Amino acid sequence: MAYRGLDLTGKAVLVTGGNSGIGLGMAEGMAAAGADVAIWGQNPDKSRAAEASLKRHGRKVHVLNYNVADEQAVDRGMNETLERLGRLDACFANAGVSGRVGKHTSFAEMTTEEWRRVMNVNLDGAFFTLRAAVRILLRQGQGGSLVVTGSQFGRMGNPLVEHYAAAKAGVESMMRSMATEFGRDGIRCNTVVPGYVDTPLTHARINTPEFVADAMHRHAVGRWGVPDDFGGIAVFLASDSSRWVTGQSFVIDGGFNVAAKIMGA
């Protein structure tokens, strides 16, 4: 008999930034495992394509357009998500923007506008999303799972992306504190920390000859990540199999952090 602990049948999940990249990989995995899925995104073409792909799994799929940096919009969106799905069991706060736009700018020259652009989505947006979700889980009284997408940049020292690094370190720390506050309510709070993943947002940058030469040899598995690599961890964290897992950070990086240069690579 197949192990049933990862069966998400009857569960309803939300993934922000779920119409492409890591978020879509998470949503695909959970839909394939039986969950009804809502995804938030702001690009209509990507959202339509994601909806068509997710519906292949035969589950309820709802695509909504909300900007996580807008506090009131997030609250409206969470209520609409609840209406569409009927309940909420897991929320993945994945929406984010890159800290690298055009020419890299020194921290000494970074504008307040650029700092706020990243913080508004990557830190404030995660806060708005998770706050609205935890209120629903508390009202339902049946526990649930909250997950945020962090980044290796929140842990390592990287020049020119101090705003992005600060936001990602902040959400990881926030999840540990939330885990201690809501554990008695059956609400688990965890972080997924990706390494270098080939997505529409990163493809051009990480596939330059210079970047490949600099970073690929540090990957024990010998390749970049792809969105599908995040379906399994999403299913686990949304499922009852993770009911005793909270306050943790799951590094999904192809062995980047543990590997020295692979000889011969």
Image (spheres, rainbow, N blue to C red):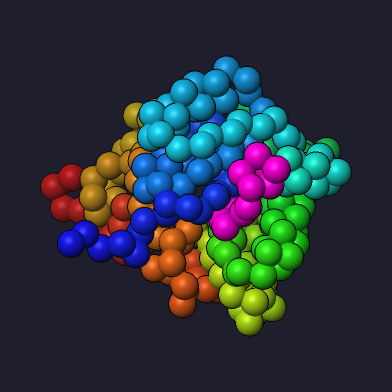
Q: Position of residue 156 (x, y in %)?
A: 52, 60
State the image quarter where residue 242 is shown.
bottom left
Q: Is residue 198 above or below residue 248?
A: above
Magenta-tinted stretch: 81-96
Which corner quadrant holds the C terminus?
A: top left
Q: Is residue 130 visible?
A: yes
Given the current orientation, which residue lies at the most extreme top position?
A: 45
Q: Is residue 92 magenta?
A: yes
Q: Position of residue 10 (x, y in %)?
A: 48, 52
Q: Who's the residue at 64% across and 77% down the image?
A: 185
Which corner quadrant holds the N terminus?
A: bottom left
Q: Nearer the viewer, residue 127 or 240?
A: 240
Q: Is residue 151 visible?
A: no
Q: Is residue 183 magenta?
A: no
Q: Is residue 96 left or right of residue 34?
A: right
Q: Position of residue 202 (x, y in %)?
A: 48, 33
Q: Is residue 214 left or right of residue 41?
A: left
Q: Nearer the viewer, residue 206 or 40?
A: 40
Q: Who's the residue at 25% across and 63% down the image?
A: 3
